[in-house]
Amino acid sequence: MDQQLKTDFPVDWVDDNYVSRRDLFKFLTLVSGALAVGSAGMAFVGRSDRETLNFDRQLIGKVSDLPVGASQTFTYPRQEDLCLLIHLSQGQFVAYSRRCTHLSCPVDYQAQNNRIFCPCHNGAFNEETGAVLQGPPRRPLPKIVLEVRGDEIYATGVTTRSEIEL
Amino acid sequence: MITPDDHHREHQLTIFVALILFSLLLILIQMWLCFGVVENLIAGKPAMAIPAAVVSLICFCVQLWMFIGIARIDRQV
């Protein structure tokens, strides 16, 4: 019976396990191709990440209600998206997501230290750019695009990742 | 006794081993680029993603070119 099988299917283990150099190179080329495709995919993701997402214009505060050095919270674009509006200097307003990019703790503005501070793990962000100054966060705070019209301040979009270099 | 055929085969084997090592080096470079890009993307710096992708594609083209060469040598043997 065994002899009959061997005659019918004459495949030897050595032949079966044999990997030709062409097969080995084919495998290495496929791995290389997969890595190249992965890199191209990440480049595409990186490009699209830089875009500003536009949402409906929303009134978030009034210039007269916010003195220089003060901040106020608001929600944008959804009710659960907490944000922070800061009056840096005369007429210069910035707004960021209030969610720390480390573990989503709410951040607060510290006017005396010129920074936005996360009390959970002592993370700090630049008040003008949202870039990371210290602590475990690695990404800058998402920036809210603002439009000041007379006495009214509007939010018009969110920049998910700014091209801020530390 | 070493015949010219043996000598030729040994020569080809040396070239093949060199190509394999070079190929592995290219793959290591591609992996290093991939990890670098992931790290930078997480850190919010996508600027290096496109140059890394270009270098990775060049590595792949070199790899493909070597594979075609190996296939041609195999066909001749």
Image: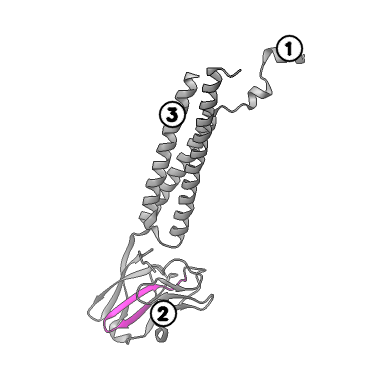
Query: Which quarter of the figure is the C terminus of chain A placed in?
Result: bottom left
C-alpha distance separating marks 1 and 2: 83 Å
Q: Secondary structure at mark 3?
A: helix
User: Which residue type does callout 2 highlight?
Assistant: Arg
Point out the residue furthest to the left here: A150
Place of residue B50 in the rendered image (x, y in percent of width and height, measured from the top left): 37, 51
Tell me, yes or no, whether dots 1 and 3 are on the same chain: no
- In the image, the segment drawn in magenta is A85-100
Q: Residue at 39% across / 48% down in the picture?
A: B53
Categorize mark 1 by other alpha carbons within 10 Å: few (<14), some (14-19), many (20+). few
Say which residue label 2 marks.
A115
Place of residue A69 in the rendered image (x, y in percent of width and height, measured from the top left): 35, 85
In the picture, residue A76 is in which quadrant? bottom left
Which numbered disc covers residue B68?
Answer: 3
Instruction: Report the label total.
Output: 3
Q: Main secondary structure of the magenta part?
A: strand
Q: Residue at 43% across / 29% down in the picture?
A: B68
Q: Nearer the viewer, residue A54 or B14?
A: B14
Categorize mark 3 by other alpha carbons within 10 Å: few (<14), some (14-19), many (20+). some
